[in-house]
Image (cartoon, rainbow, N blue to C red):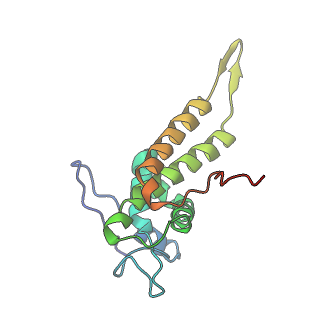
């Protein structure tokens, strides 16, 4: 089976399309924007999981072959942002959510990686994984992305409405 390829913008060999990896592995690229507009027949917004996965791979410095294994993580991040939307979102504003979803997926990826990282000791020397720095940086990436789309999201923080005496 031939693989679809993304055009390369950096002069390197073109990367296979994530949808091609999913198809190769017998999976269906659900939730992607492969066949039309951004809105389902129900009127609910659907984000382009393929676009989110590509951005996630770029942020995480992963080859696309490895990043495809994190499709569910990207899909979960897209679902969370979609659920947090304040109301209806225009097509123009919807495209702002995909980079944010990739950032959220990366933050979660960094946390999972840190949870599985181990320090090791050889003699008197201990090598630490630097997991705290990775999580802190990933969180900063996510927080910046969240600030950029704050106008689209409902605020689920604390609200003080008043006191009746």
- The picture places residue 44, in percent across and down from the top left corner, at 48, 79
Specify the quadrant that holds the N terminus: bottom left
Residue occupying image coordinates x 71% and y 14%: 123
- The picture places residue 47, in percent across and down from the top left corner, at 43, 69
Residue occupying image coordinates x 68% and y 42%: 115
Image: 42 above or below 125: below
Which of the 4 image quarters holds residue 136?
Answer: top right
Residue occupying image coordinates x 42% and y 60%: 97
Between 45 and 113, the one nearer to me in the picture:
45
- The picture places residue 145, in percent across and down from the top left corner, at 44, 48
Between 26 and 32, the one nearer to me in the picture:
32
Which of the 4 image quarters holds residue 152?
Answer: bottom left
- The picture places residue 113, in percent across and down from the top left corner, at 61, 43
Whether residue 17 is visible here, answered yes or no, is no
Between 163 and 57, the one nearer to me in the picture:
163
Image: 72 above or below 100: below
């Amino acid at each position: 089976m031939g693989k679809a390829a993304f055009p390369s913008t950096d002069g390197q060999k073109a990367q296979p399309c994530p949808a091609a990896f999913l198809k190769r592995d017998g999976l269906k690229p659900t939730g992607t924007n492969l066949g039309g507009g951004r809105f389902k027949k129900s009127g609910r917004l659907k984000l382009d999981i393929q676009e989110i996965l590509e951005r996630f791979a770029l942020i995480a410095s992963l080859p696309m072959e490895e990043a495809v294994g994190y499709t569910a993580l990207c899909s979960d991040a897209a679902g969370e942002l979609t659920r947090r939307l304040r109301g209806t979102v225009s097509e123009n504003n919807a495209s702002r959510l995909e980079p944010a979803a990739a950032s959220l997926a990366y933050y979660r990826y960094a946390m999972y990686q840190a949870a599985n990282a181990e320090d090791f000791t050889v003699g008197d020397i201990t090598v630490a994984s630097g997991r705290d720095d990775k999580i802190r940086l990933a969180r900063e990436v996510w927080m910046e992305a969240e600030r950029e789309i704050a106008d689209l999201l409902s605020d689920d923080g604390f609200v003080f409405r008043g006191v009746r005496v």
